[in-house]
Amino acid sequence: MFGKREINLSTKGNTGTLFTIPVIVALAILAAIAFCSMFAPLISPCDPYEQDLSVAFSGPSAGHPLGADSVGRDILSRLFYGGRTTIFGGIAIVLVTIAIGIPMGLACGYYGGKIDSFFMRLCDIILSFPSLLLAFVLVAGLGRNMSNAILALGIVYVPGIARLMRSLTMVERNKPYVEALHSMCYSDWRIMFIHIVPNCVSSVIVQITLNLGYAVLDLAGMSFLGFGVRPPTADWGAMLNEGRSYLMQNPLLALLPGLCIILLVVSINIFSDGLYRYLEPKQRKLPSFRAYERAMEKKRKKATKLQAEKGGCEA
Amino acid sequence: MSQLLEIKNLSVDIMSTRGLIHAVRQVNLDIEQGIIHGIVGESGCGKSVTAKSVMRLHHPRTVRIRGEIKFNGVDLLSLSEREMQRIRGREISMIFQDPMSALNPLFCVGDQIAEVFMHHFKDSRAAAKKKALELLEQVGIHPAQTRYQQYPFEFSGGMLQRVVIAIAVAAKPKLIIADEPTTALDVTIQAQVLELLKQLQKELNVSIMIITHNFGIVAELCDHVSVMYAGTVLETGRKRDMFRHAVNPYSRALIESIPKTGHAGQRLTTIPGTPPELFDLVDGCPFAPRCDFASDICWREKPLLAPCAGMQAPQGRLEAEGESPSGLPEGAHSAVEIGHLAACHNCCCGKEAQG
Amino acid sequence: MGKYILKRTLQMLFTIAVVSVLIFSVVRITPTDPITSITRGKPASEETIAALKKEYNLDQSMPVQYINWVSDMFHGDFGKSYQYRESVASIIAVRMMTTLQLMLQSAVLIVFIAIPFGMLSASKMNSLLDQTATVTSLVLVSSPSFFTGILLMLLFTMVWPVFPTFGTGTDFISNIRYLALPSIALAAVHMALIMRITRSNMVEQLSANYIQTATAKGLSRPEVVYKHALKNAAIPILTVTSLELSGLLGGSVMVEKVFSLNGIGSLLADSINKSDYPVIQSLTLLMVIIFLLCNLIVDILYAVLDPRIRLK
């Protein structure tokens, strides 16, 4: 009697997708930037370091599609190569942050006690420097070059990741499955890295993508100040600084690398935002009734059209 | 009796991340002047959504309300937001489920009560405070002077619910909607809060629409009862009639699952299964999958709320195909007068009904 | 309340002590010899070097140098700059006003534009205004302050020359115009961030249960939003705003360089590039102290706003 005929109550409708239109556009832009940087040696029209004073400040031409800079280097090629430096730098910063922050947060959350308070005080110290000041001091002490800038910025971001990881671990640690693993005499290492980390991944990934955007911006800032990438290396931040001196001769010299930075960071941020909405369904925006009805109408039309075609075939 | 609130063909659709929820489906409900009307059902059956629709608390972008909600003859759904603001708190007020989060944590409780007087009666701050102090005494919060200055986090759940009740009765409204007012409270506190509600209802002669999933509360408090299931009203009538002669199998099952004293050793009656999720509109009776008496017609056609025939001894098939009571057998007349309505294709008097 | 403030103040003093040690030692990991920065790379005789070492207290051991630095700081003596060969305190004093005014103007922009727009955006969620604001803030957040500065410079020199793009005025009032563009450039990123955070906090508060109670009382939408929700949203907004405002200190380094302003930001950048350690360490410590003082004020404001902190 019971369950004789099941009423179809399937949970249809939008279960949420990562690939909304803005995210697709952002991914396309990221893919294009990644492609141009990765294959820079193949697609660049010229050598980015070759100087030719005869074409200095020249506008777009066949040889130099976007013109040439103050010493006659091809801008387009420098943008391609600059993308390499910028993206590599951003990723390297994030890797430094992960390498330090994740184990630190994990240990703090898992063991608590003295380890926890020591590392959290350390984070407090890092956070007591306003914005990039700590990175500046570190670079001043270690020497001004790209690897030191990457290390310094990586350290600046550590507290964010470490605190997030710590709170996530504290939640996981108290769940029954961890107790079960303890009772099986698994080592702390195994429990932490094989079992707890995978359960925290989704929140951490959102934070990491967000950090990547900031890392690109901040590294560009460091290079702009002369603390990061050294000339003549092609880098969007450094190019922006070079172009700044020639704003009146050719504003493109400063505008193009700046726009590239914005485009890259906007895309990263849109992607990160989309990821957040996807992983945290509460944040998902609901469609309005008008949009919903329009979508349903479309679906209905498609269905009737399909049916009509089917009918036509049969006839 | 005059109808204070008439809900006609109310449908509420809610947009959610998982799809469109048809939370309330063609609900008809009348609440009379000066009585306590209980609305009973399992969680997720559209009770709260109906209540919030009366107050128009839903966000218009994600919630669509259709039908009519007449309060004193005025359709609330056709009022402008400004006109609705004059109704809220003044004519109809609401008590919420969780008192801990229902009050603003950063304002002292007294000010939150006084706000009603200042807003609706344009009282001065001092006058509003005086009235609020009296009200605090009236709902049993002593000493009012010190309690007035305190913040919600310094109160216990039961005391906070008294504050919420004070806010609700402050402007002496005609109707109070209480949305599961005791669910978040300890059992001992529940009885006190219910007692307070009952006492205030008598003093102020307001109508209370109380939403609950507990038939015990209905037994203690209500004059009339409506049973809701999956966004529809299945049965409605006076409490006494309901307890003695519930017609709908779901209402009966709910009543039977109240734990009784003096039945030691007997298993508690339960209803198998869970209420359906409300994504799809179904043709048949929403309770059919869980109903012991379901027959073919239950799967095909939606039962409509119609006057019950033969209230005193429910028997035979109930012809409730149309809305008009014209085709009813003899004896239905009394049922119409009593106002006992039920929605069911079968009478639940025995196994023979299912064939 | 008093105990709470005392606790916070002691915590702050401890942090300042640790940070001062940190700054002092980090700056001295350096591979550059201070003497080379003082003589600007020129070769010097033994006697000159010895004299310079004495002049700059470099002949003493590290701990002694640290103690000298800290004890001198209490007397307002921040040491002597390598590159300018004059007292760090006087260099900073000369340049402080420009940076403070720049920050003040940016703060005004943030507080009076970003926060109201964020609130408006939240109370009219999904409206055209909200969507425009969201997109604008996304672009602003992704644009480095120095590039925003360069864009503004181009715009106001070539298209619409109403604000000067370089130079400074003689006093506070005349400086307002000169610092208009730099302060916009400096504030842009922070404005966008604060707008987003104000919006998301307001949205969160507006979906809280007490908002339903307030609405059910019959209050109008503005009363619900600006009286009930705002006070609750104010606490997180305040935190972030204070962090961002003191973050302006770091941002000023880049913006001052773009607009060639003589503030402490450009002084810091300059000193790092010239390995002028006395300036770097004193200036950094000063900025950290300003930042921590801001945080302390916010902590006290918290207690004023939130009875749950005040009364516990």
Image (tube, grey):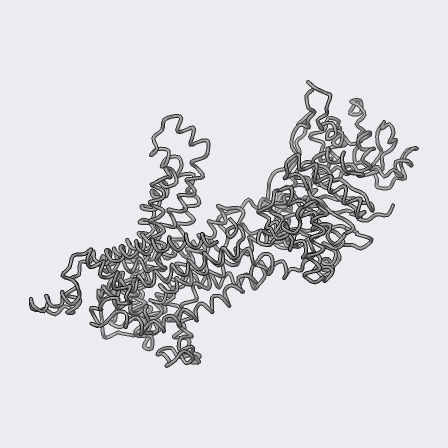
Residue C291 appears at what percent x and percent y?
Answer: 38, 61
* Number of numbered discs visible in the structure rendering: 0
Return the residue nearer the eye: A12 or B157: B157
In the picture, measured across the screen, residue C231 lies left or right of residue B338, that is left
- Picture quadrant where residue B30 is located: top right
The residue lying furthest to the top in this view is B265
In the picture, measured across the screen, residue A215 lies left or right of residue C138, that is left
Q: Which of the image's four quarters has the C terminus of chain B?
A: top right
Q: Is residue A204 above or below residue B252?
A: below
Return the residue nearer the eye: A104 or A283: A104
- Picture quadrant where residue A193 is located: top left
- Residue occupying image coordinates x 58% and y 58%: C125
- Residue occupying image coordinates x 44% and y 80%: C162
Q: Which of the image's four quarters has the N terminus of chain B?
A: top right
Residue B112 appears at what percent x and percent y?
Answer: 65, 54
Return the residue nearer the eye: B137 or B203: B137
In the picture, measured across the screen, residue A50 lies left or right of residue B130, that is left
Q: Is residue C68 above or below residue A4?
A: below
**Is residue A297 visible to us here?**
no
Residue A24 appears at what percent x and percent y?
Answer: 46, 53
- Residue occupying image coordinates x 76% and y 54%: B91
**Is residue B56 visible to us here?**
yes
Residue B242 appears at what percent x and percent y?
Answer: 80, 33
The residue lying furthest to the left in this view is C46
